[in-house]
Image (spheres, rainbow, N blue to C red):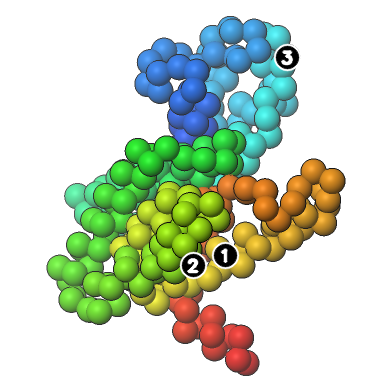
Amino acid sequence: MVYLLSFFYGAALGSFVNVIVQRLHIAPILNGRSKCLSCGEKIHWFDLVPVVSYLVLQGRCRSCKHRFGVENLIVEVLYGAVFVLVYSMVLSGLGIGVESISWLAYYSLLFISLGVMALYDLKHTYIPLSFFGGFLALCAAMMGMKLLHEVSPDTIFGPIVVAVPFLVIYLITRGKALGFGDVLMYIAVGAFFGVAQGLAVLLLSVWLGALVGGVLHIAQRKKYSLTSGIPFIPFIACVFVIVLFTDIDVFSIVSLLHS
């Protein structure tokens, strides 16, 4: 039962992230009820139940039958799965109390900010630098909590070591090869994970981005070139989640490559 509640809590956050990304260009984020972008009809609360409403309505508006994108369902399911993991690996041993509620609030804000940046970048292939403030602050808070527990070089130098490679590329190419937002993301990643796991995020996200970019180049040769910009924040976000729940670090990657 708790896992089911965790799933629907996460799915609700995923639905909220979808709303934020959709409204950023067309309406105030927290003002007014959701509307169908096709017919303008307000969407009733019972048609906003995460995952369930999409399946019941077969992904269509109740009024005009306009089909909604399946990406909304995908985001809700992914967020549901993520918060099942959050409960299983972070909250389950804490019981109900201030500590568990605080961690739930922290990870809720963390994944909301991460999801908004990833989806916005996916839709528009750029992110205003103002978007990074919340995520940077949350990752800095994690770094601070680690330092209060134990002062270690891995934690202290995380933001610098992880971000330097991309900062150098940004400076050499004068921002043509990548945006400064990517540098800020790796500063945040280094603050959250430290050096060992932060470098794992860097390596795996670069490899994943290169793999997807190569596939797109082959599949859409007439429309896509290697100089075309592809959104990179979604790759960082994807690997961020993987590393968070698997504890992969750069040493385990190197060991695997040498085995």
Between discs 3 and 1, the one toward the N terminus? 3
Q: CA distance from mark 3 to mark 2?
A: 43 Å
Camera-side residue: 16 or 37? Answer: 37
Between discs 3 and 2, the one toward the N terminus? 3
Q: CA distance from mark 1 to mark 2?
A: 6 Å
Amino acid, disc 1: Val
The residue positioned 67% from the left and 53% from the top of the image is 227
Count neighbours of disc 2 (C-alpha within 10 A) and say few if under 14, some if 14 to 19, many if 20 or more. Answer: many
Closest to the camera, between mark 3 and mark 2, is 2
Which residue lies under the disc numbered 1? 206
Camera-side residue: 58 or 25? Answer: 25
Residues marked 1 and 2 touching at CB (< 8 Å): yes
Which residue lies under the disc numbered 2? 202
The spot of residue 119 in percent (x, y) is: 54, 40
The residue positioned 74% from the left and 51% from the top of the image is 225
The image quadrant of residue 32 is: top left
The residue positioned 58% from the left and 7% from the top of the image is 41
From this view, report whether residue 212 is shown above or below residue 202.
above
The image quadrant of residue 208 is: bottom right
Helix, strand or loop at label 3? It is loop
The spot of residue 2 in percent (x, y) is: 44, 49
| Residue 70 visible, this angle | yes
The residue positioned 69% from the left and 63% from the top of the image is 211
The spot of residue 134 in percent (x, y) is: 31, 43
The spot of residue 124 in percent (x, y) is: 57, 36
Which residue lies under the disc numbered 3? 65
From this view, report whether residue 171 is shown above or below residue 117.
below
Residue 89 is left or right of residue 119, and the answer is: left
